[in-house]
Every structure is written in C-alpha cells, then in structure tokens.
Amino acid sequence: GYEQQRRTHNLLMDAAMSALHRAFGAGAGPAAGLLDRALGIVHRSGMLKRAFARQALGTAGELPRLARAGVDEARAGAG
C-alpha cells in the first residue's frame, strides 16, 4: 500500500542523495566533470527540473486520493 510505496520512494531518494554527496565530496577528477555536465543539462531543462522537483517532493507517481487533491491542482496551474 501507500506505506510501502513511500518506503521505496524514500529509499531511492536516500540513495540518490548519498550518491550526490559522495560525488560532490570527491572534489575533482572525471566524476566531478561528468557531474557538472549532468547538472548543467538538468539546469537548462525545465522539464527535467520539474521531474526532479516532483520526485523530491514526493508528488510523482501514484498517490492516495487525499494526497492527490492539492497535487492535481498544482499540476493544473503549472501546465
């Protein structure tokens, strides 16, 4: 159900944030250059920015009816 869905989302977000932390912590080298380019692409793409924001906010994918109400309104206003 919802609890399992959120647990999966939270684990994925935790893994992504940990990977970014490690990548930024590396400082220099090929990984830093690759990360810089990837972040530049995301920065220039409104679609990617919105997708990452929805994922980070927990509003991406299937949501329970009560949680969907505000998200659906926000999506309608942003579209």
Image (tube, helix red, strand yellow):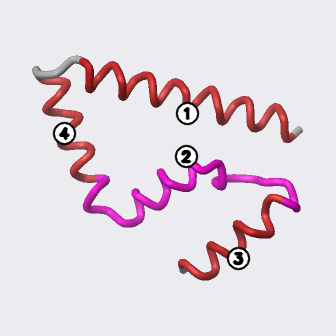
Real-space CA distance between mark 2 and mark 1, rounded to the nearest whole angstrom: 7 Å
Q: Residue at x 41, y 64 (%)?
A: 47
First in sequence: mark 3 vs mark 4 = 4
Marks 4/2 in contact by CB < 8 Å: the verdict is no
Q: Quadrant of the C terminus?
A: bottom right
For residue 69, what is the image quadrant? Answer: bottom right
Contact flag, marks 2 and 1 (Cβ < 8 Å): yes
Circle 4: residue type: Asp
The image shows residue 29, relative to residue 39, as above or below, that is: above
Say which mark, if any, is on residue 73: 3
- Secondary structure character of the magenta stretch overall: helix
Mark closest to the chain's N terminus, 2 or 1: 1
Q: Earlier in the sequence, mark 4 or mark 2?
A: 4
Indicate whether 76 appears above or below 62: below
In this figure, which residue is indicated by the disc labeled 4? 36
Per the model, the C-alpha gap separating discs 1 and 4 is 20 Å
The residue to which callout 1 is attached is 13
Q: Tell me the residue that label 2 is attached to.
A: 56
Instruction: Look at 65% across and 32% down and name the residue there.
Output: 10
Dot 3, how many residues are within 10 Å of its Cα: few (below 14), some (14-19), or many (20+)?
few
Tell me the CA gap for discs 1 and 3.
24 Å
The kind of residue on which mark 1 rests is Met
Tell me, for residue 22, which label it has, or none. Answer: none
Question: What segment carries the magenta color?
Answer: 42-66
Q: Earlier in the sequence, mark 3 or mark 2?
A: 2
**First in sequence: mark 1 or mark 3?**
1
As measured in the structure, the alpha-carbon distance from the residue carrying label 3 to the one carrying label 2 is 18 Å
Mark toward the start of the polypeptide (1 vs 4): 1
Vertical placement of residue 25 versus 76, above or below: above
Position of 20 with respect to 24 (left or right) is right
Q: Are marks 3 and 4 in contact (CB under 8 Å)?
A: no
